[in-house]
Amino acid sequence: MYLSKLYISGFRQFGQGDAAVELTFQPGVTALIGKNDSGKTAIIDAIRYALLSRDQMYFKVQPESCCHVNCLHLLHLTFPNMDFG
């Protein structure tokens, strides 16, 4: 099992619409590389938040975490070949 795709909209510095981010991952090791304050930790926190892997108070999702006035946090994780039967 691996995470093949991640879509983040309205979470922390990732906005909505054209400002949303979609990442595609391949099987194996993935490294997030970027400058300071480029969103690396926000990507990891989005995955943790969607999987409910931490206490939700840890993420401190507040109204100011939103990029826009009527913001909706949308996190979509894709795990290929999952059999839930």
Image: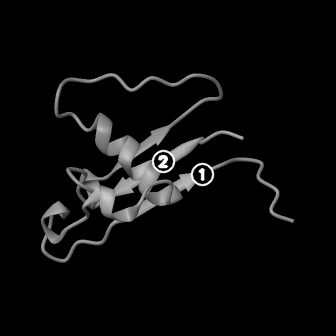
State the SS at label 2.
strand
Residue 65, position as x, y percentages in the image:
18, 61
Residue highlighted by disc 2: 6
Name the image quarter holding the C terminus.
bottom right
Q: Which mark is residue 44?
A: none
In space, the residues marked 2 and 1 are separated at their CA atoms by: 6 Å
Q: Position of residue 46 (x, y in %)?
A: 39, 51
Residue 78's disc is: 1
Q: Are marks 2 and 1 in contact (CB under 8 Å)?
A: yes
Secondary element type, mark 1: strand
Please identify the quarter of the rendering in which residue 35 is found. Answer: top left
Tally of numbered tags: 2
Q: Is residue 61 left or right of residue 80?
A: left
The first of marks 2 and 1 along the sequence is: 2
Question: Going by the image, does 70 lie left or right of 17?
Answer: left
Single out the residue that lies furthest toward the bottom.
70
Going by the image, does 59 lie left or right of 36?
Answer: right
Of the 4 image quadrants, the one containing the N terminus is top right
Question: Residue at (45%, 51%) from the top-left corner?
Answer: 48
Seen at 33% across and 66% down, the residue is 73
Amino acid on which the number 1 mark rests in the picture: Thr
Foreground residue among 74 and 59 = 59
Residue 63, above or below 42? below
Question: Where is residue 18 drawn, in percent x and y?
Answer: 27, 54
> Which residue is depicted at the point 80% across and 63% down?
84
The residue at the point 50 percent across, 60 percent down is 52
Amino acid beneath label 2: Leu
- Mark 2 residue crowding within 10 angstroms, few (<14) / some (14–19) / many (20+): some
